[in-house]
Amino acid sequence: MSQNNFPKLHNATWPGIVGKGPDSEPVISLDEMLQFTANAEVDGVKFDGVDVGLFEPHVNLEGGDDEAKRLADKVSALGLKIGSVVAPIWGGPILGSDEDRATYLDMVEKSCKFAQKLRDLGVREYGIVRVDTASSPEQWAKDPKGSQKLIVETLKEAANIASNYGERLAAEGEICWGGMHSWKTMLETLESVNSPNLGFQADMAHTLLYTMGYNFPEHRILPDGYDWQDRAVLTAALKEMTAALRPWTIDFHVAQNDGTVFGSGSHDKTGRHCLATDPHGKLNVVEDSAHWLRDENGKLTKAFKHICWDGCMFPNAVMGKQQTWNDILAALIKVRNAHGWSE
């Protein structure tokens, strides 16, 4: 087995919350998510850490130093690190009112301040603060030029805030966020903001939907009626998309998708996350990770110190099995064996 120790292998805790709630299934507690992560092991290899959503009921972002220390102690006690964190910006959509945008920036600042505290506590040595626009493609489409202007202005302010705390923001490439709902609009947003403190978060389940033109058919790369058995066509599409977005990529989620969209609870429909072992998955997880982890010449980019598995909106019956997390860890190990390095 490869002796690569980078990138570090992380599990996400927010799948215990996202898509859960009163109109879906019960939330899975942070303690349970951490325990599943800490207990996972494959051939002596374990998860190195977790990526964390900074929102209730897992984390009280208003809790200040005491809450940061509580989280750091809880994670450290299990031999884990914290990497990237998710800013809870959805109460302030960028394409809303002036007050909404002020709320958005306030939540970005609180998240960056909290992330810095985790760094100071020694539990967080790498990772970013994840954001999106908190606005729908439908809202964006009412005035594409005006929407882009507001998004760019707001994200420029957000990036400046992040720089004050020594943090970088990563915009999630997901079809349900206006201005980020196609690979070309995502690229336009990144290029227009043009800040060293704003990059791209690639999630393999979501970016596959980019190639299919969901929510923006004009930017589809895969041909209509594409035959999923033709790997060469898919590979070419992935290469075209990743060549554009990889230079901006500072955070990466290993994931699987079956070519469909899905939403549960209050979450909008987006790329369906599938288990690593799902026979309906359209991606070759290890092979297709290379498009993000290696440049066009096959050289490792080493653009981020960790990779994370994101599996939002899995049923609780699936998430409650330890084998699920062992299988996820096994997939991440294979990716690191193929595209990792040693330090």
Image (cartoon, rainbow, N blue to C red):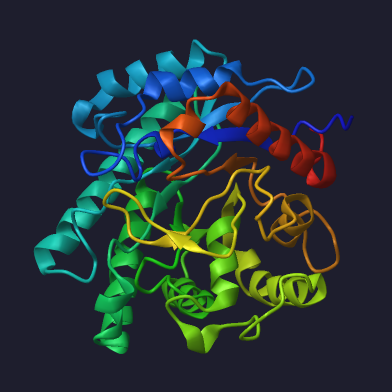
Q: Position of residue 143 (x, y in %)?
A: 25, 87
Compared to 257, does 77 lie above or below?
above
Q: Position of residue 293 (x, y in %)?
A: 73, 54
The answer to whether one can see residue 203 in this image is no
Compared to 252, does 13 lie above or below?
above
Compared to 61, does 77 lie above or below?
above
Lateral position of residue 236 relative to residue 264, left or right: right
- 209 or 74: which is nearer to us? 209
Say which residue appears at 88% left-offset and 32% top-offset: 2
- In which quadrant of the rendered image does the C terminus lie? top right
Q: Position of residue 330 (x, y in %)?
A: 72, 33
Count how many numbered circles sit on residues in the image: 0
Lateral position of residue 245 relative to residue 16, left or right: right
Say which residue appears at 34% left-offset and 65% top-offset: 155
Lateral position of residue 133 relative to residue 248, left or right: left
Say which residue appears at 81% left-offset and 40% top-offset: 341
The answer to whether one can see residue 3 in this image is yes
**Residue furthest top in the image:** 77
- 34 or 92: which is nearer to us? 34
Q: Tell me which corner region of the image, top left, top right, bottom left or bottom right, holds residue 223.
A: bottom right
Q: Tell me which corner region of the image, top left, top right, bottom left or bottom right, holds residue 140.
A: bottom left
- 242 or 272: which is nearer to us? 272
Compared to 126, does 155 lie above or below?
below
